[in-house]
Image (cartoon, grey):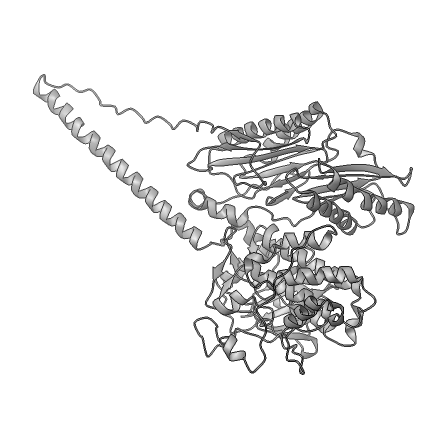
Amino acid sequence: MAAATATLVRGASPRLATGHLLFLAVASLLLLLLFSPRAAAQPWQVCGNTGNYTAKSPYQSNLESLAKALPANASRSGNLFAAGSVGAVPDVVYALALCRGDTNATACGSCVATGFQDAQQLCAYDRDAAVFYDACYLRFSNLNFIASTTNNGDPIILMNSQNVSSPVRAFDAAVAVLLNATGDHAAANASRFGTGEEGFDARSDPTIYGLTQCTPDMSSADCRSCLGNIISAMMPQYLSGRQGGRIVGMRCNFRYEVYSFFSGAPSLRLPALAPPPAPSPAPFNVTPTATPPGRTRNKTGLALAIVLPMIAAVLAISTVCLCFFWRRRKQAREQTPSYSTNDGDMESIESLLLDISTLRAATGNFAESNRLGEGGFGAVYKGVLPDGQEIAVKRLSQSSGQGIQELKNELVLVAKLQHKNLVRLVGVCLQEHEKLLVYEYMPNRSIDTILFDPEKNKELDWGKRVKIINGIARGLQYLHEDSQLKIIHRDLKASNVLLDSDYTPKISDFGLARLFGGDQSREVTSRVVGTYGYMAPEYAMRGHYSIKSDVFSFGILILEILTGRRSSGSFNIEKSVDLLSLVWEHWTMGTIVEVMDPSLRGKAPTQQMMKCVHIGLLCVQDNPVDRPMMSTVNVMLSGNTFSLQAPLKPVFFIPNSAVYSESYPTASQSTANVTSGAISPNEVSVTELEPR
């Protein structure tokens, strides 16, 4: 629900995170930002085993009826909840949807609608399927699970990969107090939803935040009983000592974190629990000895009076120095994000390692006939593994400055990013001075090879283009907001979006972009990499990049997909007008249909085309603050009732050759901002692997 946690467990014991205690003590806040939350990609799905249905069967027809009704019912419901059934045995379908209590109605309806789509895709033709997102969850089944007031089957268990630095027993006790208190509040509330915060030991985890929720059709007693079961029975087994976690069942769920993850003020604020008492210092024992009376005793007392304050002073100074050193070290780590890898990470990379002989055989020893293209990183070759799997092999150039250890660290991060709209890393080879990245092969190549071809672009009908736009938007939201690592792509363009056999878009080269800490909204670089025509103005001109830079590139992509025209080098010879100027001119004149791809005219819903153009123009606003987040873009794309603000005139245009040097510093003109060779034409990717 707003930022998920790192490890997904279902019916299994958790893998205990390991790490150096001192490192955790110094860098706990940084690790929380880097690894908080979500290693498993949304949605999390559970596919049942109650049988399958066939296409165009009565069961599918009943399911489609619920898919139309439940999103609207959930968004209209004040409790953000909907349940129902359609049909008769054996084709009856039961469904239940619940949105988190701090979600707005529009987003709730969109989330549930998306849930039906994803569940049918991820659990293809399964009669029983459930999907879980941050904002909502959904289940449909041929079994009447709605009649039960308990969590049916194994719940979803999500845990943060990081352990607490506090004493585990004290932290677990504090979490239990908070969750039980919010559970009481939720059960007593008509919405069956509650949030809370609780102070804790300020030396380690200053505040704990919690959320509990039941479906609002449950009675107060049933809700409290359901929450009590998962808090008392499952939390100690799976989440003990974790910085955050959640257990989600179809009837009730809870979540806690050491950062605020819900919207609005908490329903409850609990006072801080007293931290565990520090161990008492051992008494200072003085062994009795035979002493002469009088002056000798006075000398002993005087010596103790002098020595003890000195010892106390030394200890105090040492403590202050140690705290100062730790604080400086912590600040340095926060300013320069550390992407270290633990033993478990390196084991996962070892499992991805492929032998050089295997890849040579797969690609015909990197035969020219198997070359798919050339990018800033080197050449790409098609290959076939011994098991028949088709692959694309990226052969990093020998001039790449990336060291083996840095590359392994990078691959640890890339391997953790899993989403259906990201190209999947199959393996890696680091032998004989070669650096080879192996990805799944995309038979339809990149979007630009079809979109900008006058003949091939007819393959992309309106349905496929909408699917591509939605898929890119979801992939970007995952990179920006949903993954455990916040990723700015920096070179999003048509040639970096690949299409599988079903025209599902998959963003590539995302793992080669610069990574940044979870709380950083903007960075400044002296190395501008990207493609003019897709680059946001603040990035191209001043080196400022953020997730809003990617949003700008996405807006350009939308307009390219709709018009079939390139943004970079797509000038109208007669009018010398770039794509943004052309679209804006027709938008303001109300003639936007005239610049749509000719293959779409008369074959696509005008209202939907207008909405997509509108969203594209909102994404290319000059001020990054005015551009929407990708989560908002997804809501706008999927909803029909979302009110869109009027876009402002784009002021950043790709200039023609006559004014190029006036608007853009070239590599020779401004070496402080643009590195020579860092700017590429549309056909060449320059997203680079850089040591951290």
Mark count = 0
Which quadrant of the rendered structure holds the N terminus? Answer: top right
Q: Residue 319 location in percent, x, y?
A: 31, 39
Q: Residue 230 location in percent, x, y?
A: 65, 30
Closer to us: 265 or 671? 265
Q: Residue furthest front?
A: 589
Side (left or right) of 72 relative to 319: right
Residue sitting at 43 percent across and 28 percent down? Answer: 276
Residue 15 in view (yes/no)? yes
Task: Say above or below: 154 vs 435.
Answer: above
Closer to us: 550 or 56? 550
Residue 358 in view (yes/no)? no
Task: Say above or below: 124 vs 462.
Answer: above
Q: Residue 175 location in percent, x, y?
A: 54, 31
Task: Say above or below: 636 vs 256.
Answer: below
User: Residue 438, located in which quarter of the rendered image?
Assistant: bottom right
Q: Residue furthest top?
A: 293
Q: Residue 155 location in percent, x, y?
A: 69, 37
Q: Residue furthest left?
A: 295
Residue sitting at 47 percent across and 65 percent down? Answer: 525
Closer to us: 425 or 33? 33
Side (left or right) of 297 relative to 407: left
